[in-house]
Amino acid sequence: MLVEFTKMHGLGNDFVVIDAVNQPFHPDSEQVRAIADRRFGVGCDQLLLVERAQHPGADFRYRIFNADGVEVEQCGNGARCFARFLRERGLWSGDRIRAETRAGIITLRIEPDGEVTVAMGVPRFQPEQIPFLAAGRRDRYRLDLDGTSVAIGAVSMGNPHAVLQVDEVREAPVAGLGAAIGASREFPQGVNVGFMQPVSRERIRLRVFERGVGETPACGSGACAAMVVARQWGLVDDRVTVELPGGSLQIRWEGGESQVFMTGPATTVFEGRMEL
């Protein structure tokens, strides 16, 4: 099977994007892992599929597969690339796109400067909505990991996130502690783990250990999760620049039941064909 693809990235979080509207493509987990392999495949953090919408309120269906082959609910950096891909491939000419995901319908807007704003939905803090095993909702939870106790915030941005505050993000034990939290029984579907350093009321620094991938240069949903947890903790205002290793994202959340908005770039690297 010969498949056409586009390699893209959002602040270094990289993707293989496939038009499954004009070339039907239904990968299994082994094929996803082969595509994502950085030595023997194209290499990516996630595989993104553009499909015809199945929901009457959506323009397209947006599917996300992590590098380990598992399909997941949401990816914010991928959503920006998804929007730019539709425009660049001539699949959509408008500035506003409604994309159907496993987490629901999200709205994407291509800005005049080429950046993309994603309406990421309303953050969910109830443990059963994340999902997270806890007796009830709290702003902070304690996790005990082999004798180490850490305080986290837990939230769903369409996918599960745990956020902890650190004094210096560059020195945070992202790989070890991120993997330990991700494997904890309290998160039955796994979790993305954000290490957050507040710098001011308008700026935070962040590194994210993504489930099924490991640490990535950027994580859009992770940036949203970090911002809303920091706001719940009274550390930031309603508009925040989130600085990640790959670059910065602008996150806006007015609190309560309002949506979270994320704005940032999306870049096309190259196009190609691969044999599967």
Image (cartoon, rainbow, N blue to C red):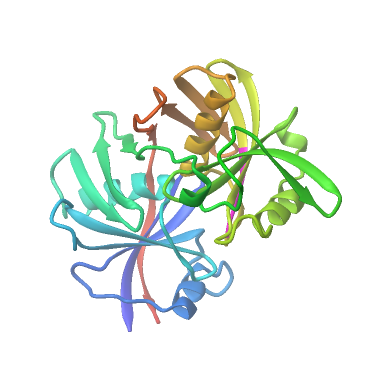
- Residue 68 image position (x, y, % from top left): 54, 69
User: How many marks can you see?
Assistant: 0
Query: In this rendering, does residue 88 appear at all?
Result: no
Please give the range of residues in magenta.
207-211
Q: What is the residue that sits farthest to the front in this orientation?
A: 135
Judge by depth and name the residue closer to the eye, 210 or 149: 149
Which SS does the magenta portion mostly show? strand
Q: What's the residue at 72%, 52% (across, down)?
A: 175
204 horizontally vs 36: left or right? right
Q: What's the residue at 75%, 27% (across, down)?
A: 167
Query: In this rendering, does residue 92 appear at all?
Result: yes
Judge by depth and name the residue closer to the eye, 20 or 196: 196
Place residue 72 in its image quadrant: bottom left
- Residue 259 image position (x, y, % from top left): 34, 33
Judge by depth and name the residue closer to the eye, 23 or 234: 234
* Up-down relation of residue 229 to residue 57 (above or below): above
Judge by depth and name the residue closer to the eye, 135 or 53: 135
The quadrant of the picture occupied by the C terminus is bottom left
210 magenta-colored? yes
57 horizontally vs 2: left or right? left
The quadrant of the picture occupied by the N terminus is bottom left
- Residue 148 image position (x, y, % from top left): 83, 46
Q: What is the residue that sits farthest to the right in this orientation?
A: 147
Q: What's the residue at 59%, 32% (across, down)?
A: 139
130 horizontally vs 22: left or right? right
122 magenta-colored? no
- Residue 230 image position (x, y, % from top left): 57, 27
* Up-down relation of residue 68 to residue 269 (above or below): below
Q: What's the residue at 44%, 20% (across, down)?
A: 239
